[in-house]
Image (cartoon, rainbow, N blue to C red):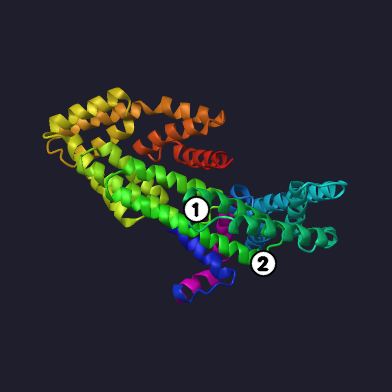
Amino acid sequence: MRRTLLAASAACILGASCASLGDPFLVAFSVDSSYQSEALTASGVDEYRERLIAQGDVAAAASVQRLFEAALRYDPGNAEAARYLALVEDFRASRFSSSMAKAEGLLAKPKRSPDDEYAMLLAVRRALDIYPRDDGAKKLHKSTADARAAFVAARLTEAEAVRVGVPADAPDAKKEKAYIQAFNLVARATDVEPRDVEGTRAYRQLRSDIARIVEKRLGGVEELSAEGRFDEAESVLAVVKELDSKIGRTFSSDIGKAEYSLNLAWARYHESRKEWSKAEARVRKALAVQKGADAAALQKRIKDAVEAEERGASFEAGLKNLDAYIAKGDLARAQRLVASLSRTAATSSQRGSLDQRRKKIRAALPPIYESGVKAYREERFKDAVAAFEVIVAVDPAYEDASGYLEKARDKQKLLDQY
């Protein structure tokens, strides 16, 4: 909730309409400069991680930098904003120098292949996107105007020849191959000259052509899922995702909806068969794609059903299951069962039995915590996440496990993107 408010307030501070948030909200922000600074910094950090680091979007660097500059105007002592401002400037400066050097090096070549020409023109475009007012970048962009126009014209001509060369009754596989080839050619043209009218028109035409194929494929996913042929549906979806990845993930939203629906239907199937672990795995996949209310409700039903089975027909049966979990080292599951049994413990003897198990669970935490810290320091972040997840499931306040867990997840996420 706090993160949402920070993001909303950042938008207000930067000039977006805040009418929907109400006057009290506005008043709160008009009197608290430190909170305004914090809001801008939080938004800036998110943008820095997502657009600059994850996506490598150099064109976004200036807008991200402005967030931190605004944060420092509200609170000059904001150390995090100052640190990230330096990181953004370093990002811009290093990418600019690299782009300029690459462009000038390729421009100096007496002969350039189409790939060389694309790399050179793209480097010019990136340099200009990073520092639009830099004299060197503007001069380089102007000096390559003729080369840029020739490159765009050639790629668009090639793309059109590929597109019209496919008969209307050709198989989808053949159309896919041709349209992807044409799309990539057009993408190269628009990369180096985003405002080209013909390039924009060609992009829209090809997007429409590919959209028809994607929609047909996604319709097949829905039909297979409805028939309970989930493995086949997942295979078709994988093909669609691969197709989409080749055209810049243009249809990621539609694919995400299909993936969510498939995993939700698959989870419900396993639920009906009381295959709780399989159902839980599928509902987690659904929620990873979209935080849907129906998937969240299903996850709760599964959790309740698992807890009921774990508690067993009697308190003693539940204790037996609990001892088995502790013996196997499944501490997260053991902790969950302790909490469940606590709600049914009716006598002091039963409560004493649970206290004994709690102590056993707690006694098993130190070596797991130490292994997590060791894994983190050795940059084995997946192992660190696994260890700290167990710790936090048992005791969220244990040492600084929660902080380690968050940092390990962030670092692993960055590694997974490269």
Q: In the image, which residues are magenta? A: 22-49
**From the image, which quarter does the N terminus lie in?**
bottom left
SS at circle 1: loop
Against 404, residue 264 (above or below) is below
Amino acid type at circle 1 is: Ala
* Residue 289 shown left or right of residue 167 in the figure: left
Q: Can residue 40 be found in the magenta stretch?
A: yes
Q: Residue 85, can we see it?
A: yes
* Residue 121 shown left or right of residue 337 in the figure: right
Look at mark 1 in the image and give the residue it sits on. Answer: 170
**From the image, which quarter does the C terminus lie in?**
top right
Look at mark 2 in the image and give the residue it sits on. Answer: 198
Give coordinates of residue 268: x percent, y percent.
26, 47
Q: Nearer the viewer, mark 2 or mark 1?
A: 1
Against 13, residue 99 (above or below) is above
* Residue 340 shown left or right of residue 222 in the figure: left
